[in-house]
Image (cartoon, rainbow, N blue to C red):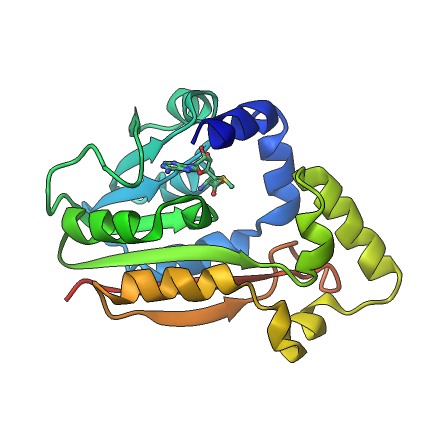
Amino acid sequence: MNNIIQFYTKISKTYDLMNHVVYSERLSRKIIELAEIKEHNTVLDLACGTGWLSRRLEGRNVLIHGVDLTPFMLAKAKRRINGDFVLGVAEALPYRSESFDAILCNMAFSHFDYQAAAGEIYRTLKPKGRFVVTDSVDPNPGIYDALAYYPARSIVKLLWVLAGQPIDKTVRDNSKAFDLKSEKIRFALGEYMETKVELHYDLLGPASRLKSGCEIIHGIKR
Ligand SMILES: C[S@@+](CC[C@H](N)C(=O)[O-])C[C@H]1O[C@@H](n2cnc3c(N)ncnc32)[C@H](O)[C@@H]1O
């Protein structure tokens, strides 16, 4: 976990800039819509980072909670958003059982111990509570894995597109390109809850050729 904290501490300064490039408003709307969030709901942004998703919950008259492992990321969320943001880990959530109407987790689950985190989501959701987990599907993981730093990945993606490679098509047509992590995440959650999966292809925003993929795993606690 220290590596993860070090990594996110290092990129916390540029993280929001990168978010503008990578995440689309359409993605956040989709996550919130799938979570069926209603007024007065208590919602957890799990591994909230700097609060990209929590921010989109503001103005909806919900109680916002956020938890994250990296103090520098969390501090930004705390400063900006009217909610309750605490330091903690997904594998041992600092909340009582059946606390949340909905738990959202954007682009973080692959860092977790899948079984432990899935169990904690299950424990802290109210009966019939909803969860939405997104995880990226890298179109060309071989190249991406060689690059640890997100901006570098984005540049490679841009070059890839400029070279005329249709990233979205690559993701759809080549089953090897699907990120196996997503399968494992689905499996871990499926042990506790019914899950559904959707693919979402506009991670890089409205410029349609600059598409990347993410899987949205969602469902309701039994
Ligand atoms: C790619 S960022 C996503 C942040 C945020 N969800 C967003 O949409 O911008 C991943 C976040 O997961 C957090 N994280 C990684 N492992 C964690 C764990 N085991 N428990 C809690 N947070 C964790 C990191 O500190 C980082 O802020």
Q: Height in image: 206 above or below 66?
A: below
Residue 9 percent across, percent down from the top left: 53, 23
Please give the name of the residue rendered at 38% of the width and 30% of the height, measured from the top-left corner: 69
Please give the name of the residue rendered at 80% of the width and 52% of the height, measured from the top-left corner: 158
Residue 170 percent across, percent down from the top left: 70, 72
**Residue 184 vs residue 32, the one in the foreground:** 184
Which image quadrant shows ligand 1? top left
Please give the name of the residue rendered at 76% of the width and 53% of the height, measured from the top-left corner: 157
**Residue 204 vs residue 185, the one in the foreground:** 185
Please give the name of the residue rendered at 62% of the width and 72% of the height, measured from the top-left corner: 176
Residue 180 percent across, percent down from the top left: 51, 64
Q: Is residue 3 left or right of residue 172?
A: left
Total label count? 0
Image quarter (top left, top right, bottom left or bottom right) of the N terminus:
top left
Q: Height in image: 94 above or below 170?
A: above
Q: Residue furthest bottom?
A: 173
Image quarter (top left, top right, bottom left or bottom right) of the C terminus:
bottom left
Q: Height in image: 10 above or below 145?
A: above
**Residue 140 vs residue 132, the one in the foreground:** 140
Q: Is residue 72 left or right of residue 88?
A: right
Quarter holding residue 208: bottom right
Q: Is residue 198 left or right of residue 192?
A: right
Quarter holding residue 49: top left
Residue 116 percent across, percent down from the top left: 26, 48
